[in-house]
Amino acid sequence: MTALDQLRAELVTPQGRKPLRALAASGQLGYGVPDAAFQAGLAQQPHFIGCDMGSVDPGPFYLGSGELATSIEVTRSDLRKVLCGARAIGVPLIIGTAGTAGAAPHLAQTLAMVRDIAQSENLHFRLASISADMPRDTLKAAVTAGRTRALGAIAPLTTTDIDEASHIVGQMGIEAFQRALEAGADVVIAGRACDTAVFAAIPAALGYPIGPAMHMAKIIECCSICTIPGGRDALLGTLDDEGFTIDSMNPIRQATPMSVAAHSLYEQGDPYRVYEPEGTLHTDGAQYTAIDDHRCRISGARWEPATQFTVKIEGATQVGERAVLLAGCGDPRAIAAMPEILTAVEAIVRELVAGSVSAPFQIYPKVYGIDGVINWPTPAPQQSREAFVMVEVIAATRADAKSVATVFKQYLLHHGFPGRISTGGNLAFPFTPPEVMAGTAYRFSAYHVVEVDALAPLFPIHIEDL
């Protein structure tokens, strides 16, 4: 009997479905799993444990490079904790977006750690891994057929974008996880996946109403962030046919109607609609009710099945090597003139390096305290007494990026401005050298939705017994 069959036998009775307990152990594995809350969650005897392991939040570098955003040591420790915890109580473990970005190298590194942990801890289970790397010929055919659309401020997808991307992944939904579970998996490690799919796949497979199940998945995937004060502690969701209850495993964190409802804004352009490959979750009719000072009850979400399957794809393309110049300024006259100084220095630098840096390069200056975070349309009501200058240089080679940043540093340090008294010392460098080599730079070249006729062929499953 598979793990899913065991849950079906336990929870689905002739009298109806019993409440299902889902433990969200981590909003992103690799940053530490608070132990006290996790152990409290295990004591609640959850029917399965879920963990998200990745995101696009860290930017395109990790998808492009194939590297993990988290340290190997902490990631291995987190994997050991959740894997041993799930096996100790005999329930499925579901992990989505392996290794930060969920492409083939991220999935391979994660699986290698899981196999090593299983061997060292003498654990035996059926492991399913699900690939999320998109077939490029399929994507090109979709571009040609006009079956892709951009998400946000990015250009339409082209076949050149597809060819040049280091990696392209698609976000799988519940369908792929359900196939893995039906194949007998005790542990599922997936490439790039919708966060909700990690927690909604089992409830949907057992016949719980998909609206409340998907809404619960949306809320609990980030663990106790939906509480006051928010945190990363394990969170228990208890689902029935009418709705679900949220319960943080840390007693100091309170799930209130306001804090849980506010989480609907998280990572959503529309707080009332969550688009998934298999359909759309509608939360405009949801009701949030306090059970007590610690727990919240949610009901009323509605699911609309898709008439057209879609998959969100993400691709990253290398754009060059990056150097970053870092400097602080406490001179009020220099701060007032900084936009003009930076423009003038850039012009000087481009002329000076024209003979030594032949390839095109980009310079992106930011002044934190003026427009570092937002390009404000109007001047600040008062000037900051300090400002931080960051100049990013992206060039074809590491040497070229350093050359441009080094010359920029010298001319920025000594550039004149109205009211200047000292000919130097108007900048403070926090490091030496002040030019920091920041590695290879990538950009998101694919951040689109593609229409597909079937989901299963895009997300192949591999089964192994450990």
Image (cartoon, rainbow, N blue to C red):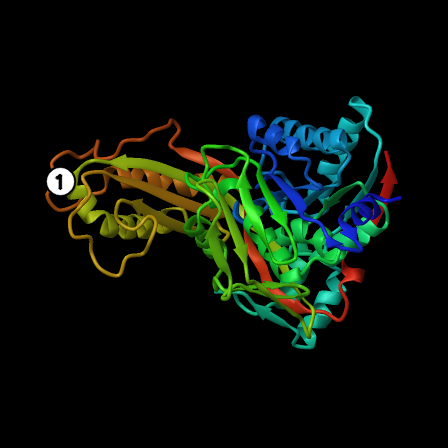
Q: Please tell me in which quadrant of the rendered image residue 135 appears.
A: bottom right
At x 67% / y 61%, what residue is drawn?
A: 209
- Circle 1: element type: loop
Residue 405 picture location, percent across and down: 40, 41
**198 to the left or right of 362:** right
Q: In front: 216, or 165?
A: 216
Residue 259 picture location, percent across and down: 43, 48
Q: In front: 439, or 463?
A: 463
Pick the quarter of the image with the N terminus: top right
Residue 122 picture location, percent across and down: 82, 24
Residue 440 visible in image:
no
At x 44% / y 34%, what residue is drawn?
A: 436
**433 to the left or right of 122:** left
Residue 218 visible in image:
yes
Which residue type carries mark 1? Arg
At x 53% / y 35%, what residue is drawn?
A: 233
Q: Is residue 279 shown above or below 233?
A: below
Q: Is residue 124 shown above or below 149?
A: above
User: Badge 1 local density, few (<14 within 10 Å), some, or many (20+)?
Assistant: few
Q: In front: 88, or 265?
A: 88
According to the picture, the residue beneath numbered tag 1 turns out to be 420
